[in-house]
Amino acid sequence: MIPHSRPTISQEDIKAVCDVLESGAIAQGEAVKEFEGSVASFVGVKGGSAVNSGTSALHLALVALGVKAGDEVILPGYLCVAPLNAVRYVGATPVFSDINPGTGNIDAERTKAVASEKTKAIIVPHMLGQPVRMEGFRELGIPVIEDCAQSIGARYKGQCVGSFGDVAICSFYATKVITTGEGGMVLSDNEEVLETIRDLRDYDEKTPYMTRFNYKMTDMQAALGITQIRRLPDFIAKRSQIADFYNHVLADLPVRLPFKATGCEPVFYRYVLRIGSDVEDFIKSMAEFNVVCRRPVYRPLHQLFDQTGLKNTDLIWNDSVSIPIYPMLTDQEKEQVALSVKKTLCK
Ligand SMILES: Cc1ncc(COP(=O)(O)O)c(C=O)c1O
């Protein structure tokens, strides 16, 4: 079976983790600090606070922005449940925005349509590795949390995602663009926000007492993160080469290939086909050809609450399917994936 995704682990990664293990200092320490600096300078912001997952990063970002029970937070319906959970951890009410039918991402116009006086933050996820067009969000006057879990290294108008909002978060889960196994980070130019997060992620020996968390990243994870981020440009280039290959060989099929918006430099975390009909049969057929495909979003968030009215989200969710794309995909495998797509769609 060709898996849907796979981490990219090299001997350099393994050595870096082993060196930390051998050092005897394996919990949060110097490697975490170095990793925070590497990610922040790559993205082009002042600093980062590393934590143990993207979900924790979102949770603490919301806390640091002062979001609490009774407040509303806007997020797109086309999204995994992690950001929704973070909103609920602070007791706020999630308000779902529809997505742009062209880009598949949230936009300022649709965000404005659901904003109210109670809105205290907007979560802007750059989905599937595709940067959101960031114009218009600042004008809403509401703090923006960019969710770069799927898109570290993507650029909009030459600027890295994660450097537009008040705060940004990353995830370094096993199969993300870069990995620390599990892990996350809050990025910001705002030192106060970063310090609040450094304080809240660690509960030990703190005065005065308040509810804090154990959300720390270990030096073992950070050592892996440091070697991974050095190779991020190579990972992005490899993903783009595979996307170019798919663009070329699938061009004549009756499907919509990934959208290329002006000013957007994606990282192809996912390569998503819109096949114009429900995707379940496509996924089954691809499995018969030994290729694992998936819906890019398990289930739209508004549907979890029986809400309706997010027409673009429903439409895009119904006919979108993600085929394998990752640096470890071999030439032979990518050819097998493309051939299987052709056979499935031309049955
Ligand atoms: C868009 C988005 N935000 C947040 C997260 C949460 O990250 P983590 O799994 O590291 O908690 C994910 C994870 O898949 C994600 O895709």
Image (cartoon, grey):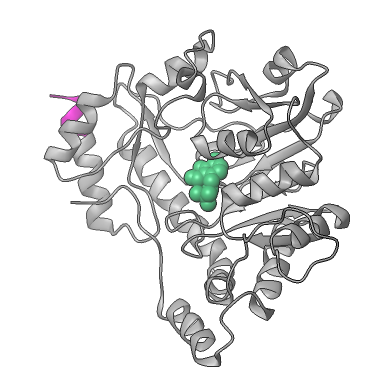
Q: Is residue 336 above or below residue 107?
A: below
User: In this rendering, would 192 be left or right of 147?
Assistant: right
The span shown in magenta is 342-347
Q: Is residue 304 above or below residue 287?
A: above
In this view, 230 is above or below 336: below
Residue 287 visible in the picture = yes
Using the image as rendered, state which of residue 157 and residue 107 is in the foreground.
107
| Relative depth, front residue between 205 and 185 | 205
* Residue at image point 39% right, 38% down: 247
Judge whether residue 262 is colored magenta: no
* Vertical side of 159 occupied by 36: above or below: below
Left/right placement of residue 310 relative to residue 29 reads: left
Q: Position of residue 216 (x, y in %)?
A: 62, 65
User: Residue 120, how many percent across, how many down?
Assistant: 79, 29
Q: Position of residue 110 (x, y in %)?
A: 67, 17
In this view, the residue farthest toward the front is 209
